[in-house]
Amino acid sequence: MATNTETGEIEDFGQVSRTVGTVFRYLLLAATMFGIVMLAILLLYVANDAIRPLTADLGWHLTFFVGLVLPTLLVGWTVYRRDRAALSFGALLVGTLVVSLMFSGGVALLAIDVIPPLVAFAYAVGLVVPTAATVGLTRYAHRISFTTRLIATTMVFYLALFGLPGPIGDPVGAPSLVPSLVEFVLTRPVIPVDRVMVATVIGGISAAAVGSYVAGVRDWTIGLYAAIAAFLASTAAGYVGPFVGLNPVPAVVVTAVAFVPTVAYAWRGAFTEGGSPLGLAFAATVVGGALVGAVAVDALGFAGPQSWVDWQFLTSSHSGTAENAGLYPAIGGSILLMSTVAALSFPLGVGAAVYLEEYAPDNALTRFVDVNISNLAGVPSVVYGLLGLGVFVTYLGRSAGTVLVGGATLALLILPIVIISSREAIRSVPTDLRQASYGMGATRWQTVKNVVLPESFPGILTGTILALGRAIGETAPLIMIGAPNVVFDLPATLGSKVSAMPLQVYAWSSLFASEDFYTKAVPAGVVVLLAVLLAMNSIAIVLRNKFERAG
């Protein structure tokens, strides 16, 4: 490519000007900073209306400044000068505790008010037993063909969950011949107490996750010990909780979902190879300072902020007055909707992405599908609401505004996004890894399962969680499918009417529009919704970084 150094002109590119490039760069920076500052100002206004920090006594602010802010700054500066990585670890540890506490509240809501402990325990047994049988069949029955194992696995799960004839015999009214394992557990005359069943289900899941996490750092023996310790801690919390003012079931859930994973992460970051205990000092300063400040202001009698985001707001249902209005049914509805959306969109989206990237031929049909998937990702959300109304309510005859219809509609909304992000993650896997797998004699499915999906999982997970973050803030699709603006009880089944946090905030700002709701309930609802969105996005970032480091 020829260059004229006298005129600064390059063929095919025109004249090069550093001044224009510099101006363009700073214009982009200014536009970005302007957007960030404007958004921050808006959020500060909303947060000020919801939390009202200036209503607290001066002594309250001074107490937390001396007990929390000042020690955090001093310890943080000291740790930063000695080990920057330790400060990042300490800050991430505090964030892990805060986010896990938020999600433990959501799990506790499900375990207490939505899914009875006995039902959760019965379905856990109905899944664990066939899973163990399937693992044993796969590991030890090598002479059995794949088709036979697939049929046997399907039958084992079907019998455990539904019995015979199960749903297959319902259309013809066939009587039950063999009860399912779930039904067998539900009909036992003697059952464990709630805290034991919750500890078995939620504590068992947490223990398995912690054990796998620790085993990846050390070995399977240490991981087994860690899993046993985690399970015992969750079980013991049910007995210790009442002594510290917590009911047994919430104590078990908070311990299993928040404290146990946080302790495991703290152990890895502080006491394994490359870790630093200095990060623990920073985290202990923040948590200890917050606790000391709370005890001190209570003992000294200083009044805190008269915040609208309080325990009453989070645990109460809607009211005609802004002071008594709460978000509890809407929070539960959002959790159930997101669970349904994740269950529907994740396997469909990832499966479609794998097929389009690894199996589908490059022809006119696949190119047509590609174009339409990209177009569907930009369709307004209200159109998906109309689609859900037409397909699920009008055509399939489902009740309007239920958990299942709402979740299916929102799943359609984010499905193109999940497919696109998953395809990009799969496409980013180097071709050399695939060729190496084929060179070692692996089939296409083995290559996808053992090479492509593990390498692309961080991107797939990040895209899915961010898509769920969009779904949890949508209002128009829920309005179109007839979801009620206000509900006073949590939905108990997939066929129950459901509301959601954005829909409740919309109702407060429209149907109940008044000065009180605008300045009290609406800002409080927006702050809670933003906190949930930030928590979901932070999990996406942490998981992506974790898997990228592991890779």
Image (tube, helix red, strand yellow):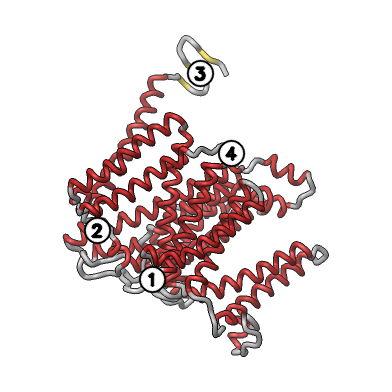
What residue do we see at 31% from left, 54% from top? Answer: 527
59 or 421, nearer to the observer: 59
In the image, residue 304 above or below residue 117: above
Is residue 332 rendered to the left or right of residue 235? left
- List the residue tagged with mark 2: 308
Q: Quadrant of residue 275?
A: top right
- Residue 212 image label: none
Q: Are marks 1 and 4 in contact (CB under 8 Å)?
A: no
Give how far apart the Cα atoms at labels 1 and 4 are. Answer: 48 Å
For marks 3 and 4 on the same chain, the one whose residue lies earlier in the sequence: 3
Label 3 to label 4, Cα distance in Å? Answer: 53 Å
Which residue is painted at 75% across and 52% down in the image?
443
Q: Position of residue 122 (x, y in %)?
A: 56, 75
Residue nearest the viewer, comparing 231 with 540: 231
Amino acid type of the residue that numbered disc 3 sits on in the rendered structure: Ile
Give the mark nearer the N terminus: 2 vs 3: 3
